[in-house]
Image: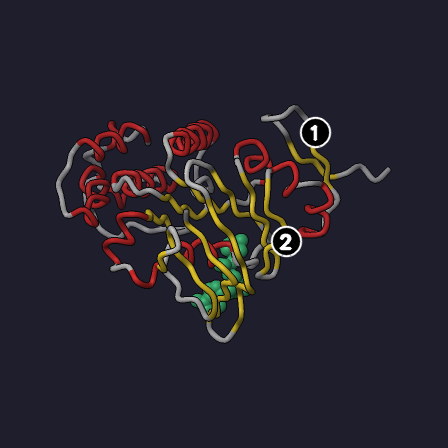
Amino acid sequence: MLGCEDLSIMRGRRLVLDRVSVRLEPGAVTVIVGPNGAGKSTLLMALAGLLPPAAGRVGIDDRPLSDMKPRERAKRIGYLPQDAEIAWDVAVENLVALGRMPHRDAARAPVERALAVMELEALRERPASRLSGGEKARVLLARVLAGEPAWICADEPLAALDLAHRASLIAHLSAEAARGTGVLIVMHDLASAMNHADRVLVLREGRLVADGAPRDALSEEVIANTWGMECEWIGLPGRHALVPSNRD
Ligand SMILES: Nc1ncnc2c1ncn2[C@@H]1O[C@H](COP(=O)(O)OP(=O)(O)OP(=O)(O)O)[C@@H](O)[C@H]1O
């Protein structure tokens, strides 16, 4: 169980998370949504142990993350930042192998599996810094997967991906969750959240305003109150699309 209780976070002099409490179960895909600046990345980073709480607690199985050494924390929680950059000219397969660093081993099987899952075998010898944006995003996620963390915390992993890679990444993360990994993702695409999440957390101005099954947390009423836009869901379960309400 990864979670926080009454968590408040300051960034600079601003309170950007205000007494947020969540307990995440492993084996599920949880999606964090909310308007720009709502605190989604901040919550994700805090749950990955990368931002100190101003107040409240963050922990795994009730053990505070602050009590864990960074390497132990990194073994358990794989974090993929938003807009991650690759600065050096390292080959794709070597960059993905860096995901084993918290384990201090050179196990090949998890690295090969991550390369296969992210469909990177054909790119394995290419310098990672010279890939397209979407290819880089897949490489960086493969590095997280190579570490076989119990929890995956990914900040907008779909943002740079094309249609097919987006679908395959969602399918893959769902499969990881089915195998018992806890998957926590920040995304803006409410339809993807509606169709693929097990649970949705809605943040607005640093507060958790909805938390539950997608159809409840992303009701048309919650969307209107949070994003200030009247929308309606159309389509069938698992294939919903969100469209602006017709005001005529
Ligand atoms: N390093 C920082 N110093 C000061 N304020 C920050 C810092 N990082 C973020 N903030 C502020 O904290 C608030 C929450 O930021 P955060 O990145 O968590 O939002 P978000 O919901 O992920 O936004 P977006 O959808 O735009 O990515 C914003 O108002 C942002 O301006």
Give the residue pinned by disc 2: 209
Rendered location of residue 50, percent (x, y): 36, 60
The answer to whether 29 appears left or right of 207 in the picture is left
Rendered image quadrant of residue 98 = top left
Rendered location of residue 155, percent (x, y): 43, 48
Residue found at x 44% / y 31%: 174
Give the residue pinned by disc 1: 234
* Mark 2 crowdedness (10 Å alpha carbons): few <14, some 14-19, many ≥20: some
Mark nearest the camera among 1 and 2 is: 2
Secondary structure under badge 2?
A: strand
The answer to whether 75 appears left or right of 209 in the picture is left
Amino acid type at circle 1 is Ile
* Mark 1 crowdedness (10 Å alpha carbons): few <14, some 14-19, many ≥20: few
- What count of labels does the image hold? 2
Rendered location of residue 120, percent (x, y): 28, 31
Where 214 sits versus 43, above or below? above
Amino acid type at circle 2 is Val
Rendered location of residue 86, percent (x, y): 29, 49
Residue found at x 32% / y 29%: 117
Residue found at x 47% / y 66%: 56
Does any atom of ligand 1 lie closer than 8 Å to the CB of label 2?
no
